Image (cartoon, helix red, strand yellow):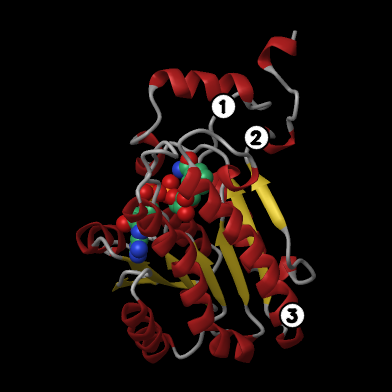
Amino acid sequence: MTSKIALVTGAARGIGLATTKLLIEKGWKVAMVDRDGVELKSASAGINAGSAFIYDVSIPDDVDEMMTKIIEHFGRLDAVVNNAGVANFGRIEEADLSLWRAVMATNLDGVFMVSQAAVPHLKKTRGAIVNIGSISGLRASTLRVAYGTSKAAVIHLTKQQAAELGEYGIRANCVCPGPVRTKLAMAVHTQEIIDAYHDAIPLNRYGSEAEIASVIAFLCSEEASYVTGQVIASDGGFDSTGVGLPALRT
Ligand SMILES: NC(=O)c1ccc[n+]([C@@H]2O[C@H](COP(=O)([O-])OP(=O)(O)OC[C@H]3O[C@@H](n4cnc5c(N)ncnc54)[C@H](O)[C@@H]3O)[C@@H](O)[C@H]2O)c1
């Protein structure tokens, strides 16, 4: 049987690399996209069913060329995982327009452009889009004026995609991870922040890349054939706690 083809952005490390490996375990072939050429080449070196495509999803010309090359290489596309993301944090008064634009360019514009370029190909396969949001798109927090807003926009973009692309059989869903110990998170999480997250999250721990990847792979698969327009937090219950203050627990 022909392997299904997934395009995973931000595939050089972290959640994107874990998703690539899991999809391959499940029989998919993966177009691994990342703008960090060095890390992408080293990550893809030992992965036979994964091919590296060094492109920046925030640059329109890159997105066009990337899609052309991927279709030339694989001939079809069954799923897109819009995972590439940046987390530049700053206080509202100090977050200048360049920080705001840099975050939006990858986290929001990138998701919009890669999905749009994929639509003609996903129509042919009745494929799936999985966008990676964040707990920060569901719950507001300090320092995340750009990051949190970009992720909230990705959540709504997912619903727009589901509403409009459903008639072609294309499903669109959003996975919102809680904290995971990747390079992105560890650049901004001190030990104090890690301890506070452990306290506040009902499951009392960070998630792993593999735990997020399994939700993504499910949404890419036929097992989720009647699931679209959904936002699934893979966050140890963090989103569900309103007044779940650590101080209220036994
Ligand atoms: N780690 C967490 O705690 C956490 C929590 C919630 C959401 N997320 C989201 O999960 C996704 C993956 O994050 P991660 O923690 O694995 O991060 P990571 O920094 O480990 O990996 C992100 C990858 O994306 C690539 N990338 C960034 N901008 C790009 C661009 N414009 N074009 C192409 N590639 C680009 C980077 O080079 C990197 O390889 C992100 O969207 C992030 O916002 C992460």
For marks 2 and 1 on the same chain, the one whose residue lies earlier in the sequence: 1
Q: First in sequence: mark 3 or mark 1?
A: 3
Badge 3: few (under 14), some or many (20 or more) residues near its Cα, within 10 Å?
some
Q: How many marks?
A: 3
> Is 99 rendered above or below residue 26?
above
Q: Is mark 3 within 8 Å of ligand 1?
A: no
Marks 3 and 2, how far apart in space? 30 Å
- Residue tagged 2: 236
Is 230 on the left-hand or right-hand side of 120? right
At label 3, the amino acid type is: Gly
Q: Which residue is mark 3?
A: 166
> Marks 1 and 2: in contact by CB < 8 Å?
yes
Q: Position of residue 199 (x, y in %)?
A: 60, 19
Which amino acid type is marked by label 2?
Gly
Please give the residue where the numbered disc 1 appears in the rendered image: 205
In the rendered structure, which disc, 3 or 2, sits on the residue that comes first in sequence?
Answer: 3
Q: Please name which of the two marks, 3 or 2, marks the residue nearer to the observer.
A: 3
